[in-house]
Image (spheres, helix red, strand yellow):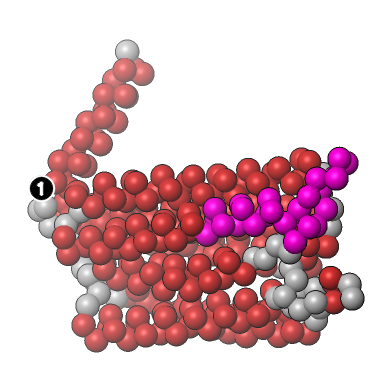
Amino acid sequence: MSIASQPGINFENLFTYTPMQHDIVSHVLTLGFVAHAAGLVYFAFAQKDIHPKLRTATIFSCFIMAAAALNLFRQFSSWNDAFNWTGSYYEIEQTFSNGFRYFNWFITLPLLLTQPMFVFGIRGKTFVRNTIIFVAASIIMVWTGYIGQMHEVTSSFQYWFWFMAGSIAYIPILWLLYEVYFVQRDQVPVHVVPMVRKLFFFQVLSWTVYLAAYLMPVFSFSADGAVVRHILYTIADIFSKLIYGVWLSYIALKISAHKGYQPAKDKLGAVSTGSGEKEKTSTS
C-alpha cells in the first residue's frame, strides 16, 4: 500500500530532498527553537519592571515560549529522523508529522488570546465571558485544522471541509479580539492607544501566515512547497508569539509607568536616555 494512501500523512513525506532543501528546514526549525528559548529568558527577566496587576501576561509569555521552544525542538528532531541520506538526496525513512504543532497550539493559543485582557485591565464578567469564547473557539479551530491537515494527501473533501469548519470558528475569535483591542480596553491610557491598535493588526497579520502554510499543498505540491511551509510556520511562530509578546510587554510597561510603578518608570527612563545618548553620538 502506498504511503500516499494513508490518512495522517502530511505532504512533506511524499518527496525526496536535496541537501539544501533538507538543511533549510533543519536550520529554520533551529532558528525557531533558539528564538523562543531566548524569549523565555527575556520574559523571565522582564516581569520585574511590570506592575504586578499586569504581570500575568508576561508570565503567560514564559509558558508560551517554553511550549513553542519544546515543540520546535521536537519538530527539528522529527525532521532529521524522518529522512535518510542516500548519497544523492534525502528520502523518507520514517514518517514526519506536523501534528505536534497543533497540540502545541492547544496550549499556546488560549494563552495568547487572553493575554491582552490582563494588560488592558479587562476584569469581571467580561473577562470570564471572553475567556470562555476564546478557549472554546480556539480549541475548535485547532482541532478542525489538525483533522484537515491529516487528510491533505488522502482526501481533498475532508481537507477543505475541516478547513472551512476551522475558518468559521476563527470568526468569533477575530470579532472578540476586535472588541478587546478597540472597545473593552477603556483602562488603556490615551497615549498608548495607537500602539494597541497597531498590535491588533500585527497579530491578525501574523496568524494569516499560518493560513498560507496550511494551504501550501494547494499552492505548491512539491519539495520546495514543503520547505516554504516550514519557513512560513516558523516565521508565524516567531511573529505571533515572540515579537507579539515583546510588543505587548512594552505596552504593559508603558501602562505600568502611567500607573506610577517606579521600576517601569525607571526602565522607560533608561531606554529614553540610551536612545538620546545614541542620537548625540551620531550627531557629533
Tell me: residue 277, above or below residue 166. Answer: above
Percent position (x, y) of residue 126? 27, 83
Percent position (x, y) of residue 97? 67, 66
Q: What residue range appears in magenta?
A: 71-94
Percent position (x, y) of residue 61? 35, 59
Would you say 22 lies left or right of 260 here?
Answer: right
Helix, strand or loop under label 1: helix
Tell me: residue 281, above or below residue 219. Answer: above
Residue position for label 1: 262
Q: How many marks?
A: 1
Q: Quadrant of the N terminus?
A: bottom right
Would you say 225 lies left or right of 126 here?
Answer: right
Tell me: residue 253, above or below residue 178. Answer: above
**Badge 1: few (under 14), some or many (20 or more) residues near its Cα, within 10 Å?**
some
Picture quadrant of residue 222: bottom right
Q: Which residue is pictured at 78% across the width and 62% down the height?
A: 13
Q: Which residue is pictured at 33% across the width and 67% down the height?
A: 115
Please check the rendered image and state whether residue 121 is part of the magenta-colored stretch, yes or no: no
Q: Which residue is pictured at 20% across the width and 35% down the height?
A: 270
Q: Residue furthest top?
A: 284
Please check the rendered image and state whether residue 73 is part of the magenta-colored stretch, yes or no: yes
Percent position (x, y) of residue 46? 26, 48
Picture quadrant of residue 74: bottom right
The reply to whether residue 280 is visible in this rendering is: yes
Picture quadrant of residue 133: bottom left
Q: Which residue is pictured at 18% across the width and 38% down the height?
A: 269
Would you say 136 lies left or right of 115 here?
Answer: right
Disc 1 residue type (three-letter):
Gln
Q: Quadrant of the C terminus?
A: top left
